[in-house]
Image: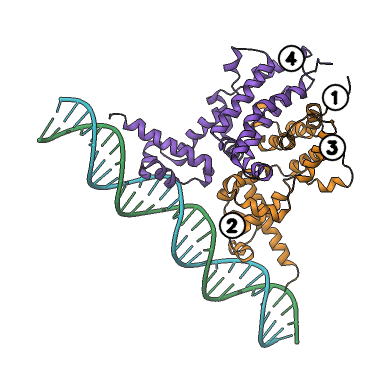
Chain colours: A orange, B purple, C cyan, D green
Amino acid sequence: MNSGTERNTEEKILKAARQVFTEKGMAGARMQEIADKAGINKAMLHYYFRSKEKLFDRVFKEAFGLFWPRVDQYLQTTTDLKTLLKAIVTSYIDVLIDQPFLPIFILNELHRNPDHLKRLFFETGVDPTQLLEIIKGEMAAGNIVEMDPRELLVNILSLSLFPFAARPLVSRILWDNDQESYVAFLKERKNTVYEFIVRAVFVSSAC
Amino acid sequence: MNSGTERNTEEKILKAARQVFTEKGMAGARMQEIADKAGINKAMLHYYFRSKEKLFDRVFKEAFGLFWPRVDQYLQTTTDLKTLLKAIVTSYIDVLIDQPFLPIFILNELHRNPDHLKRLFFETGVDPTQLLEIIKGEMAAGNIVEMDPRELLVNILSLSLFPFAARPLVSRILWDNDQESYVAFLKERKNTVYEFIVRAVFVSSAC
DNA sequence: GAAAGAACTAACCATTTGGTTAAAACAAAT
DNA sequence: ATTTGTTTTAACCAAATGGTTAGTTCTTTC
């Protein structure tokens, strides 16, 4: 064994692979580019990860974990839907501002190879039932408008994720390609998306 | 000149190219596969379109045209925002049910090569100003909640497009991979998305 | 410090891939 | 029927790409 070079090299490879794969996708990524970016020989990629596919899988699985709302971590604090909603939207936007390529990467690769999803399911422990139950509860209590709970979840995801997935399109067409103000817009969405959803589904008691 | 085989072959190539490019993306698409699917020799692709990139550009530009709300076509009928909103959401969903790969294809390729967008702008005549003006008007008239008009537009796009872009993810996780009921869900969204947005932004006069 | 094993590299290999070419098949014009 | 131009094909090519190998260097252990 050696003094930590292993973890270091492995980590260097993973970092580079994350960059290249998320930017170019599985098909567009080149092993040589990953090696260059990691500052090592191409053979090392295979030494550590055997094949492009295995390396990709590793990167993809990791990324996927960030991509589905982890309600469990907030549930200890609260079961109030409004608070929960705010937490989900906020944490999504915070994560994605740091990892702008994540949404397209995930959606794209899942699109090209949907079969991976079954495996990921189990391995990453994605599970929306908790959240859906809470929504059902609020609906039964008459606090929110009647609708398919899954629909509300889809809308939450849509409003949180789409502006990142469509960033190159939207930022150029509507924000004149000014990245700073687009990021400002994204950050404001922590509030505006929350409020938008609240107005759309919570039965107003203000009348 | 010959009796129509030209248009036919060109059209066969384009049809195959649309399929392969939208399914696999520029990087994942193979000229050979396009040729096979078109039932012709690979050399014909270059005979008609010179290069992979040129063929891709043609397909992409065409697809992009379907992807930005063409308000102009409805504006002759109405300038009422609610009616307009319903028309946009409906036409989006109708188009995308027939072309499910479109959203990821566009978003992905735009992401990998954002520079193409400038050119596309002019060539496809995409222009959101009309719609934004109408939104501003309704806001000034006090009919809808105060917000950045672009934000409302982004939300409309998000809610319309995301469920298609995320289809492999969402349909498996929330609809148990039952495509029929997922399509049913998407169709219902012509109404539910419309109503969701109306509740979120139109100042209720029902009290 | 010698042996043993792990980390690393340069050179190489087989296959795939976008693209070309030279010639054949076909159609139209004279 | 011959010429002329267009459409189509089979065979080919050079570059790129994922992967391998044989050997070198570095670490650890005794």
| Residue type indicated by callout 3 | Leu
Residue drawn at the location 69% of the way across and 63% of the way down: A9
Residue drawn at the location 83% of the way across and 38% of the way down: A137
Specify the subunit that label 2 lies on. Answer: A
Figure check: A68 above or below A44 = above
Horizontal relation, residue B25 to residue D30: left or right: left
Instruction: Give me the C-alpha separation between circle 4 and circle 1.
Output: 22 Å
| Residue type indicated by callout 1 | Ser
Figure check: B74 above or below B95 = above
Q: Are marks 1 and 3 in contact (CB under 8 Å)?
A: no
Same chain under badges 1 and 3? The reply is: yes
Disc 2: which residue: A53
Q: Nearer the viewer, residue B78 or B185?
A: B185
2 vs 3, front mark: 3
Q: Residues within 10 Å of mark 2 (few under 14, many from 20)?
A: few
Of the two numbered discs 1 and 2 on the same chain, state the one appearing first in sequence. 2
Which mark, residue A81? 3
Q: Nearer the viewer, residue B96 or D3?
A: B96
- Res B156 quadrant in image: top right
Disc 4: which residue: B138
